[in-house]
Structures are given as C-alpha cells and as structure tokens.
Image (tube, helix red, strand yellow):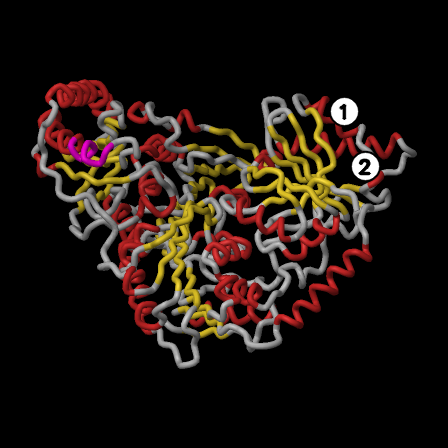
Amino acid sequence: MSKTVFFVTCPKGVEYLLADELSSFGLSPVRNAPAGVWAEGTLEAGYRTCLWSRLANRVILHLDEVDARSGDALYDGVVHMDWQQHIPVQGSFRVNFLGQNDAIRNTQFGAQRVKDGIVDRFRANGGQRPSVAASDPDVTVSARLNRGRLSLGIDLSGHSLHRRGYRTEKGAAPLKENLAAALLMRAGWPELAQAGGDFLDPMCGSGTLVIEAAMMALDLAPGRKQERFGFEAWLGHQPELWLALRQEAERRAHDGKQGPLPRMQGFDQDPRVIATARNNLRRAGLEGLVEMQACPVADLALDGGWATTGLVLTNPPYGERLSERRELGGLYQALGDAVKRLVPGWRLGVFSGAPEYGKSIGLRSYKQYKLFNGKLPAQLLLFSVDEASVRTPREPDVPGEITPRVSNEERAAMLRNRLKKNLKTVGQWARKQGIGCYRLYDADMPEFALAIDVYEGRVHVQEYAAPKSVDERSARERLAEALAVIPEALGIDRDALVCKQRQRQSGTSQYEKQAASGEFFQVHEHGCALKVNLKDYLDTGLFLDHRPVRHWIQQHAQGKRFLNLFCYTGAATVHAVVGGASRSLSLDMSKTYVGWARDNLALNGADPRRHAVEQADCLAWLAAPASPDQRYDLIFMDPPTFSNSARMAGVLDIQKDHARLIRQAMTRLNSEGLLIFSNNFRRFRLDEDLASEFDIQEVSQSTLDRDFQRNARIHRCWHIRHRA
C-alpha cells in the first residue's frame, strides 16, 4: 500500500500522547500541531486509527494544500482538484471549514467558496454534481485555513471519535471520553492493569473514567460500537480491508474478557448520577465487569479481594458557581484520608480545575500535567499513596496579613500622585454623573498591579496576582506600600479599605465566598439604591463595568416587560424598575443572590407581584418550551464564562453554548423587542451564523464609561433583534 498523509486532531495538551498512539497503529508522526498531529502511513493505519484511537477527535486524509490568500485564489485551488476520485456524483457532501485570515474572515464564506469549487469541478466534467448535506453527508470535506494556505482532506472519522456511543446521558460535569483516556494513560493505567492492578474512581459522575479504564484493560476498540464512519461512502474506501480490521477488533474483544480481569469500581454520592453511570455501563457492554455504587467519599469502604497495587483516578468538582469553593478543601482532604486508609501502595491521580486544593489531600504530588477540560485550564496531579509521600493537609496558600509600610518613598510617591490625579479627574466626573461607585485605578502603573474601586467613601482594592517574573517578596512589599499610600491619598480611614487578591480569570472565580462578615451597605447609581458587600465575596454584588448597560436599560425600560437571565444580585432589574418597566422576571441559580436581588428591588419600592425574582437554572429554563406569558420586550443576558455547578442541568461553556442560549432567549423576545447579550470572556467570538438569523449590532465601545477606558476588553456587548 502506498503511504499517504493524515492530520489527526485531539484535545489540546494531548498531542505527544497521540503521536505515541499513532505510532502503535503503524503511522509515522511527522510533526505536532496545536490540538493535532501530522503523520504518514497506509490507509490501513488510518482505518486502524479510526477504530482504535482512544485520544483522537478526527482523522483527516490529507489531499492537498492550496493558496488561500484571497477567496478567488482559494476557489481556483479547489476547482482544479480531482474531486471525482473522492465524492460519489449521486451522493452528498459537507464542508467543515476552520480558521480565518485577512481575506477570509468568515468560516461560512470560506466553506461556500470550497463548496463552489467542488461543485464547479463536477459540472465541468459532465454536468452532474453531488448534493450538499448539512447533516449526515456521505463524505465530509475538511478545510483548515492557516494564514495563507488551506489544507484540504477527507474526514475519515465523520464524527468526533470521542463519542464512543455509550454515553447518551450525562452527569453534572461530563468528561469527554478521549480526555478521560488521556488521563488514564498519563496516570499509567495500561501498565498497572497489565501488572494485575485494580481501578477505583471515588467521584465517578457518569462513569466515563471507569468505563474508559475497563475498555483499556479488556482491549476493547473505542470505535467498535460505532454504526458508521466517514469513509464508508468515500470512493477510495476499501471495504475488505475495513471488514478485516473489524473482525480483528471483535476477536480481541472476545480474548480480552478471558482470564483474570482487574477489579474496577466507581462511586458517587448522588444515586441519580450512579443510575446514569450504570446505563452508560450497559451501553458499553460492561455489565458484570464493572461495579457502580452510591457512596460519599468520606464513607468509602472496600471489601476484601482488592489487589495490592492499582490506580485511584478521579475528577472532583471544581467548585460551584455561587457557592463556597473553599469547601473543596474538606472534600480533597476526605479523598486523601480515604486512599491512605484503603489503598496504601496504590497510585492516586486527581484531575482538577482547582489544583491548588491538591495540598488538602495530604500527599506530595510527584508529577503534574497541564491539560484543558474543554476551554478550562486544569491539571492532572499524580501521587504515590505511601508513607514517604504523606504531608500535613492544608488549605491553598492565601496571602498572609500585610502591614502597610513604605519601603521605597520614590515609588510610593508615584502611586500617591497618580491616585490624587485620578481622584480629581475621574472622581469629579463620577459626581457630576450621579455615580457613587467607580473604578479609580486599574493597574495604571506596572509597579502596582491593583484595581482600586471607590464605593461612596469606602475603597475596595483587588490585587492582581503578580506574574512569575516578579519575586513574591517584592510583590508583597509593593502591596504593603499601596496599603500605606491609598488611605492617605484618598483621605479615608484605613478601616474603610478592603483588600483582596485576585487573578484575571473568569467562570466561577468572581462568585467565590471569601468571608462571612455580613457587612452590607447601600450605594447609589443613577438614582437607584443598591446593596453591596465588600468583604464576603471576591466581587461586591455590583459589576461596575456594566454601569452604562444598566443605565441604558433604565432609559429604555418604560412600559416594557423585562427579563434578566443569570441576574446575579439583580442590579440591572433595579434599573429597569426605576426606569418604569411594567413587569420583570429575574432568574439565578443561587439562593444567596436571589435573596440579594429581592432586597435590591425592595430598596427601590418594586412591587413583588409585578417584579418577580426566582431561583432557577437558566439553562434548563431556556431549554424548556416557553409558556404564553413568557414574552418580553427587553432581555438582558450576561452569563458566566464557565460553570459546572451541580445544580445545573449541564455544563455551561459560554464560547461553545452561547449560540444556543441566544436562540432560546430570542424565542421569548417579542417581535419588536431587544436582547442585550454580554460576557467577559476575553477571547470570545460571536457565532457568525447568528448574523444570518438576527439583526446584531456590537455596542461594546458605547458600554464603557470613562473609568473603564483603560480596560476596553473587560466585557463585550451586543444588541440583538429579530429581523424585520
């Protein structure tokens, strides 16, 4: 067989593992790319990758690379390729287009030009042409744009290979199957299983890690239960070769279940999740081979008959949105206590989006791997469960008490002068606008990486975590200096200053509970009274950067029905009510913030019969059919970037899910209404397909007041209307 070129995609951070796996299938890796590997080999090796890869997403048979410095150049390159060798003239095809450059800024445009080139090639050779199918095509053409070149190929997989077919239900925070397989490989499970080790997942959720571990141990091909692959209608397909590989996989599946097998079990505290895991287990054909049981980590107990070596691998919760993430310390400590008590001599792997809580386990991690769970950065921490690794469990590092002190008078004077200047200019502007809370300083000087906000005589200071290039002692020295200068420069008592450390991050971070002072007080903004708390949460209950959005709502709410999704403390609803909204509904999943929002509305005299605040999962609420009374003239939706709260129907990833959320929200919007959609994910890109369905205008620049002009990327905002 002649050799050909393949591009095999995978989750980010898994490229090196995938290259090793491809070698075992007979492919020769050429180079790694972000989230993929280029390799050479036979078609048989490509088929084997589709059937056996535990790590790949897609297997692309590379055809050619064409000039794509313009749309016309791209078309010319495509139309000169011999597509009759690949796509049946009576069949159908689809183009998956990824990437953009200065000339091709829209993937829809790029896909259209590729489609036109393919169709025109067929027409030039006799007139007949295949049809285009948006779903379930016979052949999928892959088009990947990188700068001025377009790589074209046939997607042999036809679908993402992480979908094994056994998981039609999901737990609260499902782990993709190929990422689970990568974690098992990094943790050394294949070698441990071969050496007679057993497997445990004490927080198994929908059971993905346990099922993938069993499939590895039993030598089951991940693609064995797939009904169809993308190459089966491709004209280059070799059915006899594929049949032989399928038969080989069935023989290996039979042989893998013979002889002694590892003992494999999953636990979870939620019986409903265990029921889902058992259904997934049944669909994977592993009933009787893997055990599932409902049991909290703290109560974990094992009967006799377990091996003296094995792997505990788990993906604990990352901390719920709007909940006390610091409670994770207790969960991680309970996990450490359980493994030290039950499985000494084993290996422990913990995959976490909150790796700082690994210190609560009470073991020293000997290896850490940086990976991604979807868009969320995460780490796999590996531990040996033995006496030599035992450490005293402790909470994640938090900054200790810092005594205000000036170490460098010249540097301190620079900050003092900047604060006084800002107070004179920004402060004067805020007073004239009737704004009581505003950002005074946002890392204006690199020496002092702080955000300083004024709340009507009190000051809220947030310290951005120093970059690795800044020595920790120097960073603490500068913070001590700032704490000494701020009260003096702003003319406040030191007791009126609250300081917190935070990083530039998104998702759950802004909602984490910090303390329990219960110190609330009122502030005012454009005639609205709002309740804030500077101490108990990383944020205060009022997102200052959204002030212009709230004011716009206030100015345009007269007589309108208003819906506030992911409402937080309801500040936008307060502005709508003060602006004359006839009715409003505010939804949030957190009991804490629902109560806070009700208090804010009561402060402004809102009638609770006309202005309701309800505790609800916005994902589930939007997914449900709209009732006749759920029609609104004005909708505000500012979702978190990421949330995997156990209270939610699923996981929210705003980049992946925003198009669906917008479409669902638009079903609740009256024909003349307006949806205001905003988020603070710095790399966010609005789905281009939405522009063909709705009238969309980005208004981000107009939603930034003077105090946030230095931080123009703090959020993005769109006005979305139905097309006339």
Single out the residue that lies furthest toward the right: 126
Q: State left or right for residue 511 relative to residue 646.
A: left
Q: Is residue 145 above or below residue 381?
A: above
Q: Nearer the viewer, residue 452 or 14?
A: 14
Q: Is residue 534 left or right of residue 152?
A: left
Question: Is residue 223 something that shows in the picture?
Answer: yes
**Which is more toward the observer, 328 or 557?**
328
Which label's residue is closer to the chain start, 1 or 2? 1
- The answer to whether residue 667 shows anywhere in this view is no
Q: Residue at x 63, y 44 (%)?
A: 8
In the image, taking residue 478 as reference, residue 137 lies left or right, namely right
Q: Position of residue 196 (x, y in %)?
A: 49, 71
**Within-10-Å neighbours for mark 2: few <14, some 14–19, many 20+:** some
The secondary structure making up most of the magenta span is helix
Please provide percent x and percent y for residue 588. Answer: 37, 51
Q: Is residue 56 magenta?
A: no
**Magenta stretch in the rendered image:** 471-477
Q: Which residue is mark 2?
A: 83
Question: Is 65 drawn above or below residue 185 in the view shown?
Answer: above
Place residue 121 in its image quadrant. Answer: top right
Q: Is residue 476 magenta?
A: yes
Task: Residue 436 in the image: state x and y as whole percent.
Answer: 21, 31
| Identity of the residue drawn at 19% across and 31% down | 474
Q: Amino acid at mark 2?
A: Trp
Q: What amino acid is found at the position of numbered circle 1 in the picture?
A: Asp
Kindly identify the residue that appears in the image at 40 percent across and 59 percent down: 349
Query: Residue 572: where, in percent of width, then height?
Result: 34, 40
Graded by Cα atoms within 10 Å as few (under 14), some (14 to 19) or many (20 or more), the crowding at tag 1 reads some
The residue to which callout 1 is attached is 76
